[in-house]
Image (cartoon, grey):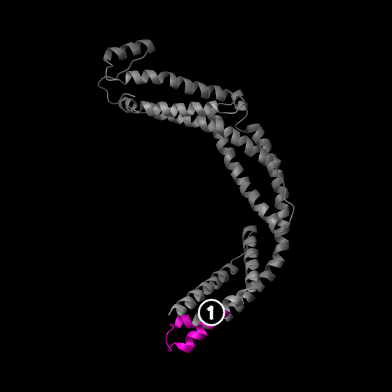
Amino acid sequence: EKLHTRAKAELEVITEYMRLTTGKLSRKVEDLDTLGFMMQVLKEVREKECSIELEIRPIMEMYQMLERYLPAGFMEKEEIDKKTVLRSYWKKLIAQALRRGDELSNKQIQYKRELQNDIRAFKIDVCNFMGDFIKNGPLVKGIAPMEAVDRLSRFKEEVKIRERKFDLYHGGEVLFALPHQEYPGLEKAKKEIKLASLLYDLYADVIRSINDWKLMVWEAVTCNISEMSDVMESYANRCKKLPGKLREYESFSQLNREINDFQTILPLLRELSKDSIKARHWEDVAVACNAKFDVVGNADFK
C-alpha cells in the first residue's frame, strides 16, 4: 500500500508537470515578455530531457512490482491511463517544444530588430523627459508649494512608465545578449524626484493634517490635543532632517512656518481646552484676535 501511494504520488507530480508545460508551450508569443518566457520554458524542457528517464523509470518499475504482487483492479482507470501514456505524453511534449523552437528562431530576428529600434527611441525619449523635468519639474525655484506637489505627482508617474520600459528593454538585452544601455538622464531624474519627495511629501502631509484639524468640532479638538502635538512634533523632526539643498527653496521656509505657527498655538489650544476655561476667557481671546468665537453652548464650533 505504501509503495502504491508513493508510485501514485510521483506519477501525479510528473504528469502535472507535463500538463502545465504543454500549456506554457501553447502560449502565444506577442512581445518581448512572452518571447523571453517561451525561451525560458524551452530551456527548462531541454534540461529536463536529460533527466526525465531517471524520473519515469523508477515509477514504471514500482508499478511493475505492484502489478506482479497485487490483484487486478487495485488501480483506478484514470491512474492506469496516466501510467500507460506517460512516455508517449513526454514524446509529444518534446515534439511540441521542437516546433515552438523552430517558430521562435524566425521570430527572434524580428524581435531583436524591434528591440534595437525601441532602445534608440527610448534614449531620445529619456533626453526629452529630462529636459521637461529640468524646465517644469517640482524643483524649479519660485513655484508655489502645492504646484510643486502636483508636478511631483505627475513626474513620479512619468518615471514609473519609463522604469517599466527600462526593465522591458533590459530584459530584452539579456535575452539577445546585447550590451546593456545606460540612461543617465533617467537615473538623475529618479534621484531628483526622491529628493523632492522628502520636501513636498512632508509639505502635503502637514497641510493635510492642518486642514483636517480645522474641520474638527472644538469638542473633538480638546480630546485630540496630545495626538496633534505628537504628529506636529514628528513633522518638525522630519523637517529638521531635510538635506541642506532643500533649505534653499521658498517651499522649505513656508513648510517651516506652517509647522512653527501650529506648534505656537498648540499650547494655547491646550489651555483653552481645560475645564476651568469660562466664557470671559474666550471673550479675552476674541479681543486679542479681533475675532468672534461662539464657543459656549455651540457643539458645532470649529
- Residue occupying image coordinates x 27% and y 15%: 279
| Residue 162 falls left or right of residue 227 | right
- Residue occupying image coordinates x 71% and y 50%: 119
Where is residue 65? Give x, y as percent.
50, 85
Query: Which quadrant would residue 127 be assigned to in this image?
Result: top right
- Residue occupying image coordinates x 56% and y 24%: 252
Where is residue 247? Give x, y as percent.
59, 24
Query: Can you say whether 173 is above or below 206 in the image?
Result: below
Report how many numbered discs are placed on residues in the image: 1
Query: Can you say whether 126 is above or below 88 in the image?
Result: above
Q: At numbered mark 1, what does the secondary structure look like: helix, strand or loop?
A: helix
Give 37 or 124, whichever is nearer the viewer.
37
Give 144 or 23, whichever is nearer the viewer.
23
Q: Quadrant of the N terminus?
A: bottom left
Q: Is residue 58 magenta?
A: yes
Amino acid type of the residue tagged 1 in the rendering: Ile
Q: What residue span does the magenta drawing correspond to?
A: 57-80
Q: Quadrant of the C terminus?
A: top left
**Looking at the image, which residue sits at the far left?**
297
- Residue occupying image coordinates x 60% and y 42%: 158
Q: Is residue 23 magenta?
A: no
**Residue at mark 1:** 59
| Residue 98 falls left or right of residue 68 | right
Give 97 or 7, whichever is nearer the viewer.
7
